[in-house]
Each structure stands twice: as C-alpha cells, then as structure tokens.
C-alpha cells in the first residue's frame, strides 16, 4: 500500500521541499500550484530521487478547481488520501494602512478561503482513508498578532482556530488535523521583506527544516501521539515564543512582541 499526499502551493519553498522529502519516503505525491513552470521542475526532481507523483494547476481560491483536482488525485492515488497539506500562501509585509485594500483581500482569499476550500473538498477522501492527517501551514505569527504583518498574522490565527476546531470534530472520523508554526523561513515569501521582527529575529530556517518538521509531525513520536499535539512550532525561536506566550502574563507577552517588532 502506497501512501499519498496532496500538497497545495507545491511548486516552490516549503511545499516543494516537503513533496520531495515525502517522495523519498515512498509517498505518492500530488503537488499543485498556479506556477506550472516550477511544478514541471519538481515533477522531474521527484522522478530523479526515485519517487512517484503527479503535478497540476490549482488556484486554491477556486473551490471548483480544488474539488476537481482532489477527485482526480484521489483516483490516481488508488482511492486514498493519507495526507493533505494546505500550504499555499501569500505574505504582505508593511504598515497595515499603506498596503492597498485589494492586496489584503487577496491574502485573505488565498490564506483563509484556500484552506477552507481544501478542507471541505478533501473531507470525504480523508474520512475513508484510515489514519489520515491534515497539515495546515499556520505560522509563528499565529502565537501573537504581528506588527507589520497584521493581515497575514490574522489569516494565520484563522488557520490556527480551524485546525483546533477540526482536530476535535474530525478526530471521531480518525482524521488528525494539525498545524505548523514556523518562524521566518528563507523562501521566496520572505525574500526582500524587512520588518521589525526580521531584523530582531532574523530569517534562520530553511524550507528543508520545515519539511523535516512536517514529516515528523505526520508520523509523531509516542509522547506527541499520547499528548495529541495539535500545534507544531518549528525551530528554537518559535518554540521559545510559543512557550513564552503560554506561560507569561498577557502584558509581558505584549511587551515582548512590541520590543521584537521595534514598535
Ligand atoms: N516563509 C516563511 O517565513 C513562512 C513562515 C511560516 C509559515 N509559512 C507558510 O508556509 C507556506 C508556504 O510558504 P513558503 O515560504 O514556501 O512560500 P513560497 O512563496 O516560497 O511558496 C508559496 C507557494 O504557494 C503558491 N501559491 C500562491 N498563491 C497560490 C494560489 N492561489 N493557489 C495555489 N498556489 C498558490 C506559490 O506559487 C508558491 O509556489 C505558506 O502558507 C506560508 O504562509 C511561511
């Protein structure tokens, strides 16, 4: 039995690295994106590492296209969907009022509606695949609202909330819903951005770090399994921020975030 994984925004960055790693681990990989040129490169690279998979166009904001791609993939993968990775995302950095409204709206369309579309369309296939897992790409910006990333951060709080809720709802269907909380990762998303926290915390993680974190979260160690871990901070800094927010008083968490953002 070959396990299958469907990845949105799979052409570059974290999606690509995760697709390649899971292909090497024997998964049948479906990578979908609006960037078909880079998908073609990934398809060749999956074959080069001895893996198997398919790639295809998908705009996650188009619910009908999402439903079609998932149905096709489910059939091609032999009637199973072991892992869904809602990874496609956009990030706009800067002062909230200086970013045009339509740019904020597009970020919400992709980061929020794209995830809802994926979850909704995939549910029938996840439910009928024993031990299925959903991995949503949230972010360390889902720990405390981030200055200079206000709208992005808010979209990731949405991802955090829907992950927590569906982790409860879908547990009864043997579907485990989790999310990843990386801090800044060195991908196209962060290239050229400069905020208070990119300066104070740096951009230290690689796409490969997150891919390895995802693989470990999909197949967790026994303690994580027993504790039913839902959120997976990636990297020392994100782990420290998550622990700090959990155990510090609210005024201190605010102050730390204010200082880190330089506001
Ligand atoms: N890079 C970071 O610092 C960081 C940190 C935490 C979380 N994340 C999250 O991880 C995920 C992946 O980020 P990344 O750093 O690999 O970004 P990236 O920009 O390198 O890759 C994102 C991919 O999503 C695709 N995409 C964009 N809009 C799409 C759409 N409408 N439909 C389908 N595909 C679309 C892009 O073409 C691209 O291939 C995102 O959800 C992001 O918010 C990133």
Image: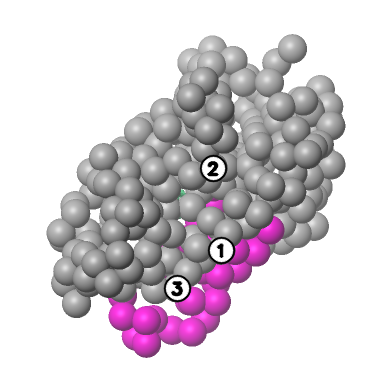
Is ligand 1 less than 8 Å from the beta carbon at label 1? no
How crowded pointer 2 is (Cα within 10 Å; few <14, some 14-19, many 20+) is rated as many
- Residue that extends furthest to the bottom in the rendered view of this protein: 97
**Number of numbered callouts drawn:** 3
Label 2, label 1: how far apart the Cα atoms are: 15 Å
- Nearer to us of marks 2 and 3 is 2
| Residue annotated with mark 3 | 151
Whether residue 41 is visible to the viewer of this picture, yes or no, is no
Rendered view: 83 above or below 244:
above
Mark 2 or 1: in front is: 2
What quarter of the picture does the C terminus occupy?
bottom left
Give the magenta part as a residue range. 87-116
Judge from the rendering whether residue 220 lies leftward or rightward of residue 60; answer left or right. Answer: left
Q: Secondary structure at mark 1?
A: helix
Badge 2 or badge 3: first in the primary sequence: 3
Residue situated in front as seen by the camera: 46 or 156: 156
Q: Which residue is mark 2?
A: 230
Mark 1 is surrounded, within 10 Å at the Cα level, by few (under 14), some (14 to 19) or many (20 or more) other residues, namely some
Q: Is residue 170 visible?
A: yes
Q: Write down the residue under mark 1.
A: 158
Residue under the point 48% across and 76% down = 103
Is residue 93 magenta-colored? yes
Query: Looking at the picture, does residue 42 appear above or below residue 92?
Result: above
For residue 17, above or below residue 256: above
Q: Nearer the viewer, residue 49 or 151?
A: 151
């Amino acid at each position: 039995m070959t396990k299958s994984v469907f990845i949105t925004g799979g052409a570059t960055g974290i999606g690509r690295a995760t697709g390649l790693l899971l292909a090497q681990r024997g998964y049948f990989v479906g990578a979908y994106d609006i960037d078909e040129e880079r998908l073609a490169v990934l398809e060749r690279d999956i074959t080069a590492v001895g893996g198997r998979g398919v790639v295809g166009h998908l705009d996650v904001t188009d619910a009908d296209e999402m439903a079609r791609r998932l149905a096709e993939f489910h059939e091609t993968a032999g009637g199973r969907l072991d892992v869904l990775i809602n990874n496609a995302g956009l990030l706009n950095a800067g002062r909230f009022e200086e970013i045009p409204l339509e740019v904020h709206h597009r970020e919400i369309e992709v980061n929020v509606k794209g995830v809802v579309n994926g979850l909704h369309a995939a549910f029938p296939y996840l439910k009928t695949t024993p031990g299925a897992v959903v991995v949503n790409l949230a972010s360390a910006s889902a720990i405390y609202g981030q200055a200079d990333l206000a709208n992005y951060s808010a979209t990731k709080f949405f991802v955090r909330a829907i992950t927590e809720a569906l982790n409860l709802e879908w547990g009864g269907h043997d579907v485990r819903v989790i999310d990843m909380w990386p801090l800044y990762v060195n991908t196209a998303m962060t290239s050229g951005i400069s905020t208070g926290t990119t300066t104070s915390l740096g951009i230290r993680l690689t796409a490969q770090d997150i891919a390895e974190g995802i693989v470990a979260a999909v197949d967790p160690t026994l303690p994580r399994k027993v504790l039913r871990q839902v959120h997976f901070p990636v990297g020392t800094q994100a782990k420290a921020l998550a622990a700090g927010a959990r155990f510090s008083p609210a005024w201190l968490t605010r102050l730390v975030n204010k200082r880190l953002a330089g506001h």
